[in-house]
Amino acid sequence: MSAPAIKSHEFEHATDAAIAACGGNAREAVKKLLVENAQLHDELAMAVPAVSYGYSKGWHARRRCDGDMPK
C-alpha cells in the first residue's frame, strides 16, 4: 500500500472536521466515511476493467495480486 496523501498531523484536522460535519456525532461520522469508502471502492472496481494493462503499466494487476482491490 502506498503512503497516504495526507500527512499524519493533517489527519487530526480531517478527523475533527468529519465529526463536526456530523454535528459532533463520531459514530455517524464513521458510518458516513465507511459509506463513502465503499462507494469509492465500487467506482475503482468498475474503472479497472476499462483501463488497459499497458496504460496502467500493470498497476491494477499488481494491486489485485496484493489483495488491495476487489476481484
Image (cartoon, helix red, strand yellow):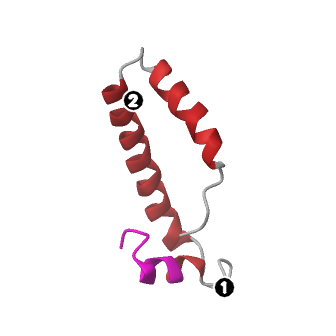
| Residue that label 1 marks | 54
Quarter of the image for residue 2 reads: bottom right
Residue in the foreground of this view, choosing between 1 and 50: 1
Dot 1 falls on a residue whose secondary structure is loop
Residue 67, placed above or below residue 17: below
Quarter of the image for residue 54 reads: bottom right
Residue in the picture at 39% in, 29% down: 29
| Mark 1 Cα-neighbour bin, 10 Å: few <14, some 14–19, many ≥20 | few
Residue in the foreground of this view, choosing between 30 and 59: 30
Residue 29, placed above or below residue 2: above
Residue 2, placed above or below residue 66: above
Dot 2 falls on a residue whose secondary structure is helix
The C terminus: image quadrant = bottom left
Q: Which mark is residue 69?
A: none
Residue in the picture at 33% in, 26% down: 28
Residue stretch rendered in magenta on the structure: 62-71
Count of marks placed on residues: 2
First reached walking from the N terminus: tag 2 or tag 1: 2
Please state the horizontal and vertical placement of residue 18, each as a whole percent of the image.
Answer: 49, 28
Q: Which mark is residue 29?
A: 2
Please state the horizontal and vertical placement of residue 66, each as a whole percent of the image.
Answer: 44, 80
Q: Does the segment drawn in magenta span residue 63? A: yes
| Mark 2 Cα-neighbour bin, 10 Å: few <14, some 14–19, many ≥20 | many
Residue in the picture at 43% in, 41% down: 36
Residue in the picture at 68% in, 79% down: 55
Closest to the camera, between mark 2 and mark 1, is: 2
Quarter of the image for residue 33 reads: top left
What amino acid is found at the position of numbered circle 2 in the picture? Ala
Q: Does the segment drawn in magenta span residue 46? A: no
Please state the horizontal and vertical placement of residue 6, each as a whole percent of the image.
Answer: 65, 48
